[in-house]
Image (cartoon, rainbow, N blue to C red):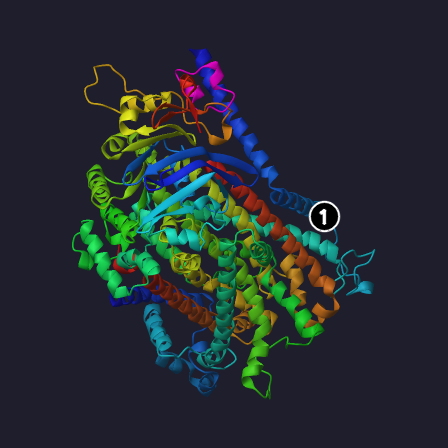
Amino acid sequence: MDTKEIILDVKKLNTTFVSDKKETKIVKDVSFQVKRGTTLAVVGESGCGKSVTMNSVMRFLGRNARVSAENIQYNALDSDGVQEYHLENLKNPNGPEMRSLRGPHLSMVFQDPMSSLNPVYKVGDQVAEGLIEHTGISKKEARAKVLELFRQLGIPDPENRIDCYPHQFSGGMKQRVVIAIAMICNPELIICDEPTTALDVTIQAQIMELLKKLQVENGKSIILITHNMGLVAEMADEVCVMYMGRVVEFGTLADIFDHPSHPYTKALLRSVPVLGLADGQKLETIPGITPNPADLKPGCEFADRCSECGEHCRGKNIPAFEIAPGHRVRCLKYNTFPEVD
Amino acid sequence: MSVKKSGIKEQNKSASASLMKKNLRKFFNNKLAVVGLVVILVMVAACIVGALMHVDYNTPDLRNMKSAPSALHWFGTDTIGRDLFARVLYGGCYSILIGVFCAVASNIIGAALGAVAGYFGGKTDKIIVRISEVFQAFPQLVLVMMIVAIVNRRGLSNLLFIFVVTGWMTTFRMVRNEYLSLRGETYVKVCEAFGMSNSRIMFGQILPNVMTPIIVSTTTNVAFFILQEAALSFIGLGVADSTPTWGNILNAAKSVAVVTNQWWIWVFPGAAITLFVLAINFFGDGLRDVLDAKQQ
Amino acid sequence: MLKFILKKLLAMIPMLLLISMIVYFGLQATGIDPINFLVSPDVLSANAANVEALRESLGLNDPLIVQYFRWLGNVVTGNLGYSFDGSSIAATIAVRLPYTFELAGWSLLLSAVIGVGIGIISAIRQNGIIDYVGRVLAVLGQAVPQFLVGIILIQIFAIKLGWFPSANRVSPGAANPLADAFFHLFLPVLTLTIGMVAVLMRYARNTMLDVLNSDYIKTARSKGIPEWKVYLKHGFRNAMKPVLVIILFRIPMLVGGSVVIESVFSYPGIGLTMTNAITSGDYPVVLITTLIIAAAMLVCSFMVDVLNALLDPRVRLGE
């Protein structure tokens, strides 16, 4: 692996939730890589495990989750070279090593800005908190930096707004504050968990433009979790398609949109509503419903809803096949191609 | 056509039957709740049997006053020689009766007022809320004591009345809140559009959605009223001594001499209250777990 | 903020009036002759011959509403009337109310610290030993009647072990008044605290759990700040308000409980006064003490409102 090129490498990530006596595996053998300075979109239906995957990487999950992986490697680029951090081995998810990475190196933008901000503290203080923690600068200096970041993010009247409480902001502004919290320590990798799902379409566009600008101008790497294929088309360089806790297809934007290979990917793209449907032509949907993770049978998870399913698809684990450089599909239709891990 | 209809009806029936079975199974998995239920049933049965058998709780056995538990008197005798076991059995009848009656009655009143206030809103709501606020400005026990003083006649029916009149407010508040939020639901508007009468909407449509917290709170209130009656009787302001209740029997324990020398007089009724209240709390918790899941 | 406080203060006044009306008309409903509690027995006996004139001078032949307002004026200026045994009610209350404040106050403080402390630790270290023990104690504490706890404590610590007195508030001729107070208060306060802790522990635990499941806790963690800051600055700070509100809401139950506990320990507070007054039919004392207690409760609920505003900017600045 070229650690200068790859900023995050995740190999065979498994996350299991333990409750009372039941164990449910939510994320199964998920592997993906994020190239430095690019945007990776992670797409899939609600409940397919996208958020859990990212929360596992950031080690945010509580005690009832068991996270194990062959590799969760973050490569930090500094003036001397590359520093490798192996996150899968950390015994204490909230211990000092992980915490030193959260903020200055890795950060996350959460889905619901309404509940992501602490209601009892001023927004300026909340943004400055991480900065002061990691750099130890004074409150005054931190305040200046927060003001500057607010201006960059397009928050109007920042001198006054910095002393306001979250409930005094609109949804779009709140999300900008959340982005400010994620950006204040200048991290290299930003994970955005459906950052605009809870916002109006117009605000959505503004926020996505903002994120794109950050990437292009500052060379940041972004992981964008979404179920909106339109957003993917606009923002992503590479796409990772997930279904029921597994990566079913991975490739560049062109690979996924021009040569969708997994039946699920094809169905996803077909179900995006487009203008110009003929009279009487129905909107395409994926037949069936998302199964309960606890009820899954061995074999391909998509088998019950797949139009191209065959006998051999149920029964054992489906490996991934590389059908083009950098384009992987987990489907037995391509078993003539070389297998990859 | 008719075959299809009966198919759906049967489907619904079997669906609700299997839901019931699922809930029952869930309930019986909760061991504490089951133990609670068993204890409740056993104690209630014992008390009823005791009452039916007309156990003698009033005649003093003058030769065995203040005697410790023995073969003759299983729980011993009290200060004037009455058999304590009989008194605890009979007292259970009254205590449990008071608890259940007051819990049910006060919850019916509280729920009805809450429904009216939450549904109609506006002036009706303001007036009823104001009344409940005035009642709640007094600590409940203090309010009870004040009314007991004014009424000045001890008696079971008076006590029941006073408890119910001072105990409806918590249920009222809870039901009112539910109605205020459910009022705006779409199905309510649909019913109104159909010209359904207010009382039918209130009690036929919205009420079933609020039943779970009402049922659970009724159960826990039984424990509350039993405890309140015990406290009131202990300080001497409950029902007259001739009617035994668990609290009444404990009244004798006001004297330090009795506490030290005749431990059985306060240990047995005390244990009875504690056991019954524990059982109700466990049962209520189990009930809530089952019913809440159903709501989801 | 000041405007908020003033608004809440003003809202208290109609409630106080309503309560005073209930008390006054309750007094009337007992059927006793007002002259018995409006003047001291000395004055009554001095005017035995001329009771009618005394009546007239007190305005007892005026319409009820007028009498009510006159009585209200008296109450506000501190003239609370006389009990049947001749003593001034105001004087009695002045001595006994502070004792009840002591009892309730210490119980409140101790149960708040212990109950909330255990509750929060239970939430942070779920299913740990403290959580388990706490939950067992909470269940027991809510099932055993409070007065029974008092009796058991007396039996063990006062009678068998003799460490504490079993009754009263003051031992005559005690050397050190503070130590004396401590020994007399210990068991009653412990009894009340046990009952309150059982309830508070569960609320504190559930509130803290809710807060710890909030999204802003994840945001706090994503900044890389140490865990203790996450729990204290973000977790506890948000749990503080609902927990404090719950504590203050429990004060009426605490007062009700202390009425009973004062009986168990023959503790000369306002609760015992009321109990004895009911038993002896001393209506003026009963009703005036009820009035004082209710007024105190209103002040408490006013403090809840103020605390609500202080701790939550959404309330203070309006949503």
List x then y, in percent, for residue B13.
51, 23
The answer to whether residue B241 of the structure is visible from this angle is no
**Is disc 1 surrounded by few (<14), some (14 to 19) or many (20+) residues within 10 Å?**
many
Residue A271 vertical position relative to residue A39 in the rendered view, above or below: above
Left or right? Give the position of C189 relative to B184. Answer: right
Q: Which chain is indicated by disc 1?
A: B
Residue B88 percent coordinates (x, y): 70, 55
The residue at the point 32 percent across, 55 percent down is A119
Q: Specify whether residue C245 is painted magenta.
A: no
Q: For this view, does B274 lie left or right of residue B166? A: right
C130, A11: nearer the viewer: A11
B192 vs B212, nearest the viewer: B212
B208 relative to C74, above or below:
above
Element marked by disc 1: helix
In the rendered view, would you say A335 is above or below A102?
A: above
The residue stretch that appears in magenta: A302-318
Dominant SS in magenta: loop
Would you name the residue on which mark 1 appears?
B50
The answer to whether any part of residue A87 appears in the image is yes
| Type of the residue with mark 1 | Gly
Which residue is depicted at the point 60% across and 55% down? Answer: C136
Residue occupying image coordinates x 51% and y 24%: A298
Quadrant showing the C terminus of chain A: top left
Pick whichever, A162 or A308, lies toward us.
A308
